Image (cartoon, rainbow, N blue to C red):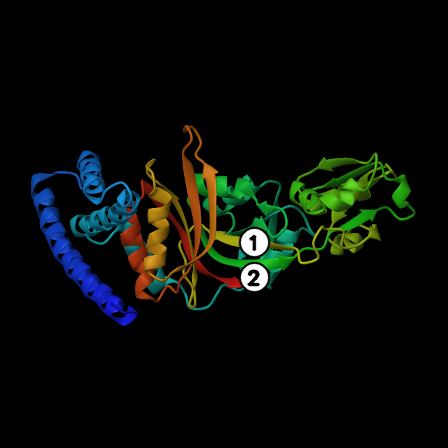
């Protein structure tokens, strides 16, 4: 047989597979009806284990790994279809549809916004990027920003989520698990760290440098070249600058933004000391209320997966099957659990596409729990 004949044979086999899958899903719908009438659960782990073992034995040793993956996905899709039939429209879908209908068309102009830090913090720059006319309330910790939003003291909160050099701000992921807040917008802020000290202080005089732990991580190369200088983390880069300004010591400096030099009467001893010139921090804006503004094309989710082989692969295969681009995948250990993890996903998908709502149906049958964090636009 030549190549064209072989391809024709493959096409014929594939058409047969499609017909068989269609027939199988028809039977799955009947199974769902039976389970609904009898009160039986959708997931039957013993039945699935037995089937996978039997199919692997039929396939033989060489093909067993292939059938494990293939039928694992088929089983997940079958469970998702049964969940949709038994549960009807999910609570997540209903909430999203409500937000799409009820969110005002124009992004807010003058809200009260919570930021961690003080005047001159990078969170302030992010806030001004998203809300040029907003009123800012400053809080000492990330936890306090979440609390201010949850309690209604502030309408929104601005928080750093990740940095292109130092990576993710893990505390924010943990707080997103703990609190019931939604992401409504994000933006990227160019971060340039400067070495700031009191006027008249020379670089050789410095014995201690203060800054936020993320800024310290972003300037490791610069700091390693400063021999016998102590590096001390503090709550915020702007707070480090203020601390240096108000201190009576003349042997300390801060890693902070260029704007903090003028704000706190300091002198820039060295500029752009971060390890990479292309250094950006991504900030998110959180809200107590789910709001989805026109043009939203990015969605964030948190899921906990079953502790079974291939669980993450099967979740990822849903995105691939729906043509959804995965922008970010992050894992965090679950508190008070042994070796269980939460997975954070950023998906590139329009809220107006059929695939957007379909992804929730397909995931609900494959995950232990799913937390929808919001759909939004990223300001660049």
Quadrant in the rendering for residue 291: bottom left
Q: How far separated are the C-alphas under marks 2 and 1?
A: 10 Å
Which residue in the structure is indicated by mark 1? 283
Which residue in the structure is indicated by mark 2? 130
Q: Which mark, residue 266?
A: none
Image position, residue 249 (x, y; %): 86, 36
Image position, residue 146 (x, y; %): 51, 44
Q: Nearer the viewer, residue 18 or 275?
A: 18
**Residue 21 horizontal side relative to residue 230, left or right:** left
Q: What residue appears at the point 70 percent right and 46 percent down from the top-left corner?
A: 237
Image position, residue 250 (x, y; %): 88, 39
Q: Which of 163 and 122 is in front in this view?
A: 163
Image position, residue 159 (x, y; %): 56, 49
Mark 2 nearby-residue class (10 Å; few <14, some 14–19, many ≥20):
many
User: Mark 2 touching mark 1, by CB under 8 A?
Assistant: yes
User: What kind of element bears circle 1?
Assistant: strand
Mark 1 nearby-residue class (10 Å; few <14, some 14–19, many ≥20):
many
Q: Nearer the viewer, residue 292 or 71?
A: 71
Of the numbered discs 2 and 1, the one sitting upstream in the chain is 2
Quadrant in the rendering for residue 340: top left
Q: What residue appears at the point 10 percent right and 52 percent down from the top-left corner?
A: 27
Q: What residue appears at the point 48 percent right and 45 percent down from the top-left corner?
A: 330
In this picture, is 313 found above or below 8? Answer: above
Q: How many labels does the image show?
A: 2
User: What kind of element bears circle 2?
Assistant: helix
Q: Quadrant of the N terminus?
A: bottom left
**Residue 102 horizontal side relative to residue 170, left or right:** left
**Residue 112 horizontal side relative to residue 233, left or right:** left
Q: What residue appears at the point 73 percent right and 35 percent down from the top-left corner?
A: 232
Residue 179 can be seen, yes or no: no
């Amino acid at each position: 047989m030549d190549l064209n004949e072989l391809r024709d044979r493959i096409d014929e086999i594939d058409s047969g597979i499609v017909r068989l899958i269609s027939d199988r899903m028809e039977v799955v719908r009947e199974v769902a009806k039976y389970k609904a009438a009898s009160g039986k659960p959708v997931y039957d782990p013993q039945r699935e284990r037995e089937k996978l073992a039997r199919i692997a034995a039929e396939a033989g040793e060489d093909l067993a790994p292939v059938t494990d993956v293939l039928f694992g996905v088929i089983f997940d899709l079958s469970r998702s279809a049964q969940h949709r039939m038994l549960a009807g429209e999910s609570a997540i879908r209903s909430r999203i549809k409500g937000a799409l209908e009820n969110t005002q068309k124009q992004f807010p102009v003058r809200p009260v916004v919570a930021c961690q830090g003080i005047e001159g913090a990078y969170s302030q720059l992010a806030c001004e990027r998203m809300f040029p006319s907003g009123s800012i309330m400053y809080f000492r910790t990330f936890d306090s920003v979440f609390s201010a939003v949850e309690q209604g003291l502030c309408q929104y909160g601005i928080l750093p989520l990740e940095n292109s050099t130092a990576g993710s701000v893990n505390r924010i992921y943990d707080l997103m698990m703990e609190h019931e807040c939604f992401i409504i917008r994000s933006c990227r802020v160019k971060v340039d760290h400067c070495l700031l000290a009191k006027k008249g202080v020379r670089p050789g005089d410095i014995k201690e440098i203060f800054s936020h732990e993320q800024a310290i991580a972003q300037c490791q190369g610069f700091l390693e070249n400063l021999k016998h200088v102590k590096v001390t983390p503090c709550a915020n880069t702007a707070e480090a600058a203020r601390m240096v300004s108000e201190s009576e010591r003349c042997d300390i400096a801060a890693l902070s933004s260029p704007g903090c030099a003028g704000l706190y009467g300091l002198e820039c001893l060295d500029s752009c000391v971060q390890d990479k010139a292309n250094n950006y921090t991504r900030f998110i804006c959180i809200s107590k209320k789910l709001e989805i503004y026109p043009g939203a094309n990015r969605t964030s989710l948190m899921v906990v997966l079953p502790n079974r082989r291939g669980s993450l692969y099967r979740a990822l295969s849903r995105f691939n099957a729906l043509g959804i681009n995965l922008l970010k995948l992050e894992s965090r250990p679950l508190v008070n659990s042994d070796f269980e993890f939460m997975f954070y996903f950023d998906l590139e998908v329009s809220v107006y596409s059929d695939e957007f709502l379909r992804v929730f149906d397909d995931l609900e049958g494959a995950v232990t729990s799913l937390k929808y964090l919001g759909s939004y636009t990223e300001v660049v």
